[in-house]
Amino acid sequence: MAAPRGCGGLSIKPVRPSRQHRPRGTRVAGGNPAGAGAARAASHRAAPQSAVGTIAATAPAGLIPLFPSRSVPIMSSGPGPSREPPRYLSKAEAEAMEKELLEDYRFGRQQLIEIWGHACAVAVTKAFPLPSLPRKQPTVLVVCGPEQNGAIGLVCARHLRVFDYEPTIFYPKRSLDPLYRDFTTQCEKMDIPFLSYLPTEVQLINDAYNAVVDAVLGAEAELGEGRGPCAGILATLKHVRIPIVSLDVPSGWDVEAGSSGGISPDVLVSLMAPKLCARRFLGRQHFVAGRFVPYDVQKKFELNLPEYPGTECVVALSAPQ
């Protein structure tokens, strides 16, 4: 990666302390630095020991809230580590949870798609860090379908571009939904190329890209949709030799029953929580992007999501028992 720009070759020189800003302990003619230091130390010892105590001691009455004597738990983004394995959702449960987020918690659909697309891009960077890519160019092919899963793929591609990857999008059946058209425009404005057709000769794909993001069909797809207009795309993806990252549900899989001879992704990114079909996933890495789910929703659906370290928005899951 290129070195960060913007410094303009300027060098920063250390600043020498002036006479008005001498380091502590410097001897001053005619003074008593030891006595001054002792006075300062005494004043520090006399000050309140906590930040709240210091503010309360100096602020006017009524400006500092009184905290209860009992310990107040620190707010966190979710529950602590759970000993229970994550729960795998049926299609009806996944739809009910998404409906609750949209209607009761007032998440916007654009907001959810943006959260999911960003999390999927982060998962790609974890599965395939830039230094580990086999090709000099960090190319990734993102194949998008016409429904919500395809829109998530568009957002994923945009964030991959921000993360210094070089995504290319194949979006053969563009949706007329204004929201999805906005996501398309954002990718076009960021100079992300769109393929006019998907090569049927899979060797061309193997030679040009490091990985493929499968955003063709998702949990919203009905059984049998993979046999329609998407059949040719799935047939091609089934034979590529480079890794495939599937978003939420691998294309061509039944949400609950799993694969029936469809594609075999190397990486799966489950959105909100893993679906029942993920129990049949045999790839090398399974991520779940569910940190944003409010704790009450997690509890209601008994998700038992794993702990997300630090500020991570995705976490790797172990194989189901």
Image (cartoon, rainbow, N blue to C red):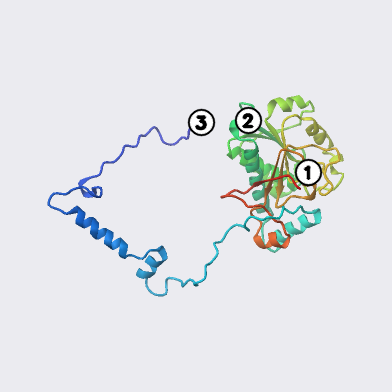
- Mark 3 falls on what kind of element? loop
In front of the other: 263 or 179: 263
Q: Earlier in the sequence, mark 1 or mark 3?
A: 3
Q: Residue at x 66, y 58 (%)?
A: 107
Q: Nearer the viewer, mark 2 or mark 3?
A: 2
The crowding category of the residue bearing disc 1, from other C-alpha atoms within 10 Å (few below 14, some 14 to 19, many at least 20), is many
Disc 2 element: loop
Q: Amino acid at mark 1?
A: Leu
Crowd around label 3: few <14 · some 14–19 · many ≥20 (10 Å): few
Amino acid carrying label 2: it is Leu
Lower position in the chain sequence, tag 1 or tag 2: 2
How far across and down, in percent of the image, does residue 79 sit?
A: 63, 58
Q: Nearer the viewer, mark 1 or mark 2?
A: 2
Q: In the rendered view, tell whether residue 272 sits above or below residue 242.
A: below
Compared across the picture, whether 76 is left or right of 54 comes to right
Q: Secondary structure at mark 1?
A: loop
Q: Determine which of the numbered discs, if any, sits on residue 2 in the image.
A: 3
Asked whether the residues under the numbered discs 1 and 3 touch, taking CB atoms below 8 Å apart as contact, a structural biologist would say: no
Instruction: Report the amino acid beneath label 3.
Output: Ala
Name the residue rendered at 76%, 52% in the picture. 88
First along the sequence among labels 2 and 3: 3
Query: Which quadrant would residue 268 be assigned to in this image?
Result: top right
Circle 2 is placed at which residue position?
133
